[in-house]
Amino acid sequence: MKENAMTDTIDRAELASEPTPVATAARNRTALALLLAAVFVVFLNETMMGVALPRIQESLHIDATQGQWLTTAFALTMAVVIPATGWLMQRLNTRPVFIVAMSSFVIGTLIAALSPVFETLVIGRVVQAVGTAIMMPLMMTTVMTIVAEEQRGRVMGRVSIVMSVAPAIGPIVSGALIQVLPWQGLFWVMLPIGLVMLAIGVRRVPNVSETRKVRLDTPSVILSALAFSALVFGLSQIGSAAVGSAAVQPWIPIVVGLITLAFFVWRQLVLQRTDSALLDLRTFLSRDFAVSVSMMTAAMVSLFGAFIVLPQFARYTLGLEPLWVGAILLPGGLLMGLAGPTVGRLYDRFGPRPLVIPGSIGLAVALWTLALGLGEGSSWVVLLGAHIVLMLSLAFLFTPAFSSSLGSLPPRLYSHGSATIATLQQVAGAAGTAIFVALYATGVASTGGADPDLPTAAAAAHGSHLAFLAGGILSLGVVVLALFVRKPAAGAAEVPELEVAEA
């Protein structure tokens, strides 16, 4: 009797210590709100640099080629760190990972703000990028862990607000600050925001994930770092090579990256047999994941490429001042963010196909309009309209693609799926920028004697035409892929194991 009484007391104590459904829901809302805010901050910081580059170059007495390393080094670091986030999020719980990410961002911001020379500023940007690289996969994995399947589209819609509004307002905020502050002011403004986010996170971010001991495979880390950094760097040099100013011939790092990537993939296939892969590639055995991610990657190539060329066309062909260029690009980004929650609710109700098919068609219409409907005599209204259609179409693509791809995976692969998507985003960004810039530069150069840094209206129009033509062709592939996207069945099945011979 005494033993039964003690057991009953222990059982009641354990039940009392279990969080109630109301407490769990409140905890989950807190986690999502803080992670969304943190991702907004790091995304805003990432998109503020472009407008400030000329001022930084003048202040530090560097040329445009050197200045580009502030964005190139950031992208390279992201490409190196992101593949390892799958391992990190299995090894550590939600709050420690958040602290690592935001601490890195804060330290990098402080280094950049205090930088007396260009080299120190690059170091600060690299440290910032480490935190940025961790934050997005952390948020995506957390969403998939704590949000019910029937509500994921709605939450992913909120994520799309962050992904679109921050890049939309980043250049405007940067342009306003740089008018009244030295370039260091950009970092001094972001520093207290980062510190506040870190302080709140230390106290309020709950641990919502399950951890397990996973060995970090050092050869995989080295191979992934070399492969993805070489690919991103090589792609970033294509545009410079088109005008004869590349630091190295692009094919060299690209070939090195592809060869190293092949070894990286082979090693992951072997390590998957013991669940110790740095980046588990069994995610691609899910048909829905593979199709959705392929569609999203192709769309992102178009997005990043358009972001690079649109301002060039507006500035040099239409003759608009930088402030007006930013104003034209602002409505599309804001509308994309505002559409996110609605698209998410529609996804939860109807699934992805009624959204991604019209979204892919809208993407194609926008890019073909930019390719064939713009020229020297064009009105800025046409550019504004095409950009709005482009951004709204991407809203109809990205939220369903994120939800369908990660929703098709078993929970044990959420972190690897998030890391894979974030890695492909970086490669897609580098590829889109490289392809569009190379074609733009080639078009400008083909007009004969045009200065690529200050092209004539006709030269900029011809270069933009070639770049957007490539985007239009790519968009047709997005339309085809959209036809095969589907909503994962409730309770995604385990993906099968890969049979790989021992090395």
Image (tube, grey):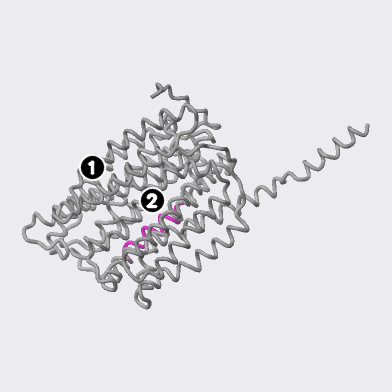
Q: Report the residue that reaches farthest toward the left.
A: 448
Q: Earlier in the sequence, mark 1 or mark 2?
A: 2
**Residue drawn at 50 percent across, 39 percent down:** 414
The front one of 474 and 41 is 41
Q: Does residue 11 lie above or below 441 as drawn?
A: above
Q: Is residue 362 visible?
A: no
Q: Position of residue 262 (x, y in %)?
A: 31, 33
Q: State which quarter of the image contains the C terminus.
A: top left
**21 lies left or right of 130:** right
User: Quick one: 63 or 452, which is closer to the camera?
Assistant: 63
Say few, some or many: other residues with alpha carbon within 10 Å of mark 2 (under 14 / 14 to 19 / 20 or more).
many
Q: Residue at x 14, y 63 (%)?
A: 455
| Residue marked by disc 1 | 473
Disc 1 or disc 2, which is closer to the eye? 2
Work out whether 283 lies above or below 311.
above
What span is in magenta? Answer: 328-340
Q: Is residue 191 visible?
A: yes
Which residue position is annotated with label 2? 78
Q: Nearer the viewer, residue 19 or 258?
A: 258
